[in-house]
Amino acid sequence: MKKLLLIYVVLIGTFMAYLYMVYFREDSGGPLDQEVGLHGEVDEKYVMVNFLTGIDYWKNVLKGFEDAAEALGVSVEYRGSTKYDVHEEVTVLEQVIARNPAGIAVTAINSEALNAAIDKAVEAGIPVVMFDSNAPDSKAYSFLGTNNYNAGVTAAREMAELSGASGKVGIITLPNQLNHQERTQGFEDTLLAEYPLLQLVSVVDGKGDQLVSEQKAQAMMEQHPDLVGIFITEANGGVGVGNAVQSAGKLGQVHIISFDTDKGTLDMVKSGTISATLAQGTWNMGYWSLMHLFHLRNELVEPMADWRASGVPPLPTYVDTGISVVTKSNVDDYYAK
């Protein structure tokens, strides 16, 4: 009986000691009082600003942004211009800045036009990062997106394989947008350096519009009846070009390389109308944009005592979010699940 009582006393004493340690650590702000991992507040709101809001291309970017918000316990909002209109995006960005959010992720419809608004936000203490399309001369802290020049190189090499590295090819693009300029330049430089028998005969503006791109492709094929390929540098034009090639009865003659993975494009890859499309790491753009903003907002990075005055970047200034080639053989992997 005495032994049993002694065991009870020891057990009770051990339990009381445990409770004391728990409460002591909580009172002293010890490790048990700390949350595991990064965590913000629900009223800490971050905003994503884009253009042509609502198109399929942005859905996976926003999904990444929302997934990061859920992981961090913060709130996010999605704003943008409804049209391909630089003035409208500037207006939307100014409206967002006026509400003083915790941070802003921006994709630039024009590499220069948003600089003043971006700089205004940063100077007011609002962290800004760029995604998908950069504004390199602004004060934004970082850019997360595709290495667009290399994407153009990849498209040129794919076109060479499809066409036998010989013939006339064209590009349908958005000439005023930096990421599309880089894709075009990468494609053109690679043809000149590696495929001298592949001749770039036309570069035209598709306005980011399916119907306009279809019309431009029709005109391009009429002007160059022996055309063997068209590279489209943006998400909306691929289906339009596919329609044009089908209407002209030139499937198999005019090879199409498109960009991105909206359902219409994937369906045409699956049917063989579009030979290949380039898939960007869109989810990565959204997810890591918010992670960058969260670190900046909460001052979780400090490369040196006064990094602002010294100009030392607190985060990677450029993050390549990756690209992959989608063809008929792997297209099923890219449909939304």
Image (cartoon, rainbow, N blue to C red):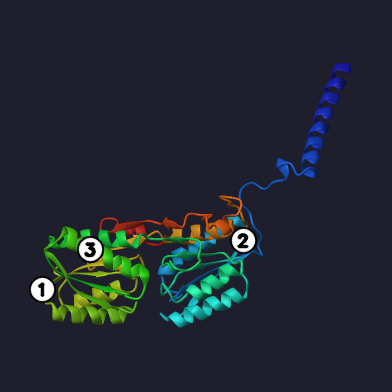
Residue holding disc 2: 74
Q: Name the residue under label 1.
A: 226
The 10 Å Cα crowd at callout 1, few under 14, some 14 to 19, many 20 or more, is few
Precedes in sequence: disc 3 or disc 1: 3
Label 3, residues with CA under 10 Å away: few <14, some 14-19, many ≥20: some
Question: How far from the left and from the top, in percent, is residue 169?
Answer: 17, 70
Relative to residue 332, is residue 113 drawn left or right? Answer: right
Q: What element carries label 1?
A: loop
Reading the image, the residue beneath label 3 is: 189
What is the x, y in percent for residue 203?
Answer: 23, 75
SS at mark 2 in the image: loop
Q: Based on the displayed image, in which of its 4 quarters is residue 242 positioned? A: bottom left
Seen in the picture, residue 60 relative to 249 is either above or below; the reply is above
Quarter containing the C terminus: bottom left
Indicate the secondary structure of the residue bearing disc 3: helix
Q: Is residue 327 shown to the viewer in this render?
A: no
Q: Earlier in the sequence, mark 3 or mark 2?
A: 2
**Residue shown at 61%/76% (left/top)?**
98
Residue at position x 45%, y 75% from top? 51
Q: Which amino acid does label 1 sit on?
A: Asp
In whole angstroms, how far apart are the C-alphas of marks 3 and 1? Answer: 22 Å
Number of marks in the rendered image: 3
Apparent side of residue 238 relative to residue 144 in the rendered image (left or right): left
Q: Is residue 25 left or right of residue 235?
A: right
